[in-house]
Image (tube, rainbow, N blue to C red):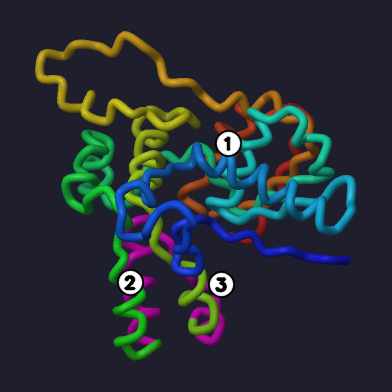
Amino acid sequence: MERRLGNNRGNKYSKKSVYHSPTSLAFWNFSMDEFAFYDIPDSISYILTTTSQASLSYVGFSQGTAQAFATLSIHPGLNDKVDVFIALAPAMSPAGLHNSVVDALIKASPEAMFLAFGRRSILSSATMWQAILYPPIFVRIIDMSLSCLFNWSGRNISAHQKLAAYPHLYSFTSTKSVVHWFQVIRNKSFQMYDDDVSASFNIGGVAKHYKVAKYPTKNIKTPIVLVYGGSDSLVDIQVMLKELPTHTVAQEVCR
């Protein structure tokens, strides 16, 4: 059985483009919408073409699950090309961050992210710190950050596994992608990107005259299997199941 590993645009393994320099604003002008509308369908099409197969099985982890939920919901034909979608630590309806200060900030105004980090990549210096720091110290910083933001303990991952995995699991992305997630959290809706990020600053309380489109995830025909941790603060399984088709299967693993 052949296996292919997907790779998101803009991470430390994917900073090349035939059209834009990674130092340009245009290179980083993407959110989850671009993954859903273009990248995932193109990746699936490429794999099926090169392997001469009619369909494949998709295994996603965290962000990779959100991209699949989004793309399968808006591309009906793609559902016939994915025979099963296994979602590990599925991400679609996170309630917010564990840190109350950061959570309040991002829910009040996603625009603050652009003001703080610019409109290119976010935390692009992470690779420099990874190269400079003693690996166990780098792991410790990641653990502290995960505990602060998400209340994750990491107790089910051994020290050796962390040393091997953390340098590859965590990478930078576009600030716009992070802002998109904060919009999802703030509006409690698995929605498309809202270009009017400045709407949060409406002093007079003037409401928007439009509603941002949600991803129609109930339209997904592909069989879905959700595998989630009982202590994962980013997974609200009951809320998620309400937004997914009835054929979805959910399996909790140890807390």
Question: Residue 235: x percent and y percent?
Answer: 53, 45
Query: Going by the picture, which residue comes out furthest to the bottom?
Result: 134
Kindly indicate the quadrant of the structure image that contains residue 200: top left
Which of the pair 49/146 is nearer the observer? 49
- Answer whether labels 2 and 3 touch (C-beta < 8 Å): no
Q: Nearer the viewer, mark 3 or mark 1?
A: 1
Image quadrant in which the C terminus is located: bottom right
Element assignment for label 2: helix
Give the residue at mark 2: 126
The boundaries of the magenta stretch are: 136-162
Residue 36 visible in rendering: yes
- Answer with mark 2 or mark 1, whichever residue precedes in sequence: 1
- Three-letter residue code for mark 2: Ala
Q: Estimate the spatial distance between the alpha carbons at disc 3 and disc 1, rounded to whole Å.
A: 35 Å
Element assignment for label 1: helix
Residue at image location 35% in from the left, 44% down from the top: 176
Residue 159 magenta: yes
Residue 50, labelled with which disc? none
251 displayed left or right of 199: right
Q: Nearer the viewer, mark 2 or mark 3?
A: 2
Residue 156, labelled with which disc? 3
Q: Nearer the viewer, mark 2 or mark 1?
A: 1
Query: Going by the picture, which residue comes out furthest to the front?
Result: 19
**Mark 2 nearby-residue class (10 Å; few <14, some 14–19, many ≥20):** some
Question: Residue 243: x percent and y percent?
Answer: 61, 27
- Answer with mark 2 or mark 3, whichever residue precedes in sequence: 2
Q: Is residue 4 above or below residue 178?
A: below
Give the residue at mark 1: 37
Residue 37 magenta: no
10 displayed left or right of 228: left
- Answer with mark 3 or mark 1, whichever residue precedes in sequence: 1
245 displayed left or right of 136: right
